[in-house]
Image (cartoon, rainbow, N blue to C red):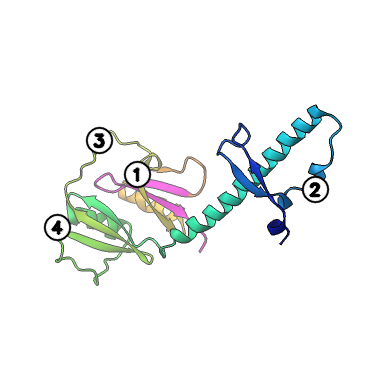
Amino acid sequence: MASLLNPPLTLPQNKLNPGGVLSVATSAIPSKNFQPFLTQKRSHRHCLLIRAKASVETDMLAKDSVGADAVDDKDFGVVSMHHVGILCENLERSLDFYQNILGLEINEARPHDKLPYRGAWLWVGSEMIHLMELPNPDPLTGRPEHGGRDRHTCIAIRDVSKLKVILDEAGIPYTLSRSGRPAIFTRDPDANALEFTQVDA
């Protein structure tokens, strides 16, 4: 209510207020800032301080207002990751890796014959990997040895040490996380990088 009764403080454009003329209710600035000054020099310095404070407060209010609106405007209802599409040269070879090495199961409910290419949908928890037998535009050679430095799909698992044994027995190369956390990186037969990170059950 006090801000409606006090006249607005108009700030001219200057270095402390580069955005142009702003109008701020003087009730936002403590009354002690308007006490009489002993010298003209002190008065000028104090005036600049008042202007700077008013400019900062106005900018903060504007940012808070814009931030709140922006969050609401961008809320379109994200629920979760549905699936990750992975390209493969030979579907059977990829299925051998994903099913027989990694133990993933096919989602039989997903259509295979409605797309103009061969593919398969594999369950990864409640999400899926969509294998697509399509030409790969990415080079298969010259990729980083460590999959964590390449585009990769990350799958949460309960036991990294058990997966390490499975990969060792299958002769599949891998690297461990460089940060020391329980995670392992490997590649599928088409050099797609996969990360498996250990999480609590």
Circle 1 crowding by C-alpha within 10 Å: few under 14, some 14–19, many from 20: few
Q: Nearer the viewer, mark 4 or mark 3?
A: 4
Q: Which residues are magenta?
A: 183-201
Disc 2 residue type? Ser
First in sequence: mark 4 or mark 2? Answer: 2
**Residue type at mark 3?**
Thr
Name which residue lies at 82% across and 45% down: 32
Mark before the other along the chain sequence, 3 or 1: 3
Image-based side of 164 in relation to 84, left or right: right
In the image, 82 versus 105, the foreground residue is 82
Label 4 and label 3: CA atoms lie apart by 25 Å
Q: What secondary structure is found at the residue carrying circle 4?
A: loop
Crowd around label 4: few <14 · some 14–19 · many ≥20 (10 Å) = few
Q: Residue type at mark 4: give it.
A: Tyr
Question: Badges 4 and 2: C-beta atoms under 8 Å apart?
Answer: no
Marks 2, 1: nearer the viewer: 2
Q: 191 left or right of 91?
A: right
Residue matched to label 2:
31
Q: Which residue is mark 1?
A: 151
Number of other residues with Cα within 10 Å of mark 2, as a class: few under 14, some 14 to 19, many 20 or more? few
Q: Amino acid at mark 1?
A: Arg
Of the numbered discs 1 and 4, the one sitting upstream in the chain is: 4
What residue do we see at 33% from left, 57% from top?
102
Left or right of 194 on screen, residue 48: right
Asked whether disc 3 touches disc 2, contact meaning CB atoms under 8 Å apart, the reply is no
* Residue bearing the label numbered 4: 117
- In the rendered image, residue 43, in percent from the top left (x then y), is placed at 79, 33
> Marks 4 and 2, Cα distance to the nearest angstrom?
74 Å
Instruction: Look at mark 3 in the image and give the residue it sits on.
Output: 141
- Asked whether residue 191 is drawn in magenta, I would say yes
Earlier residue among tags 3 and 2: 2
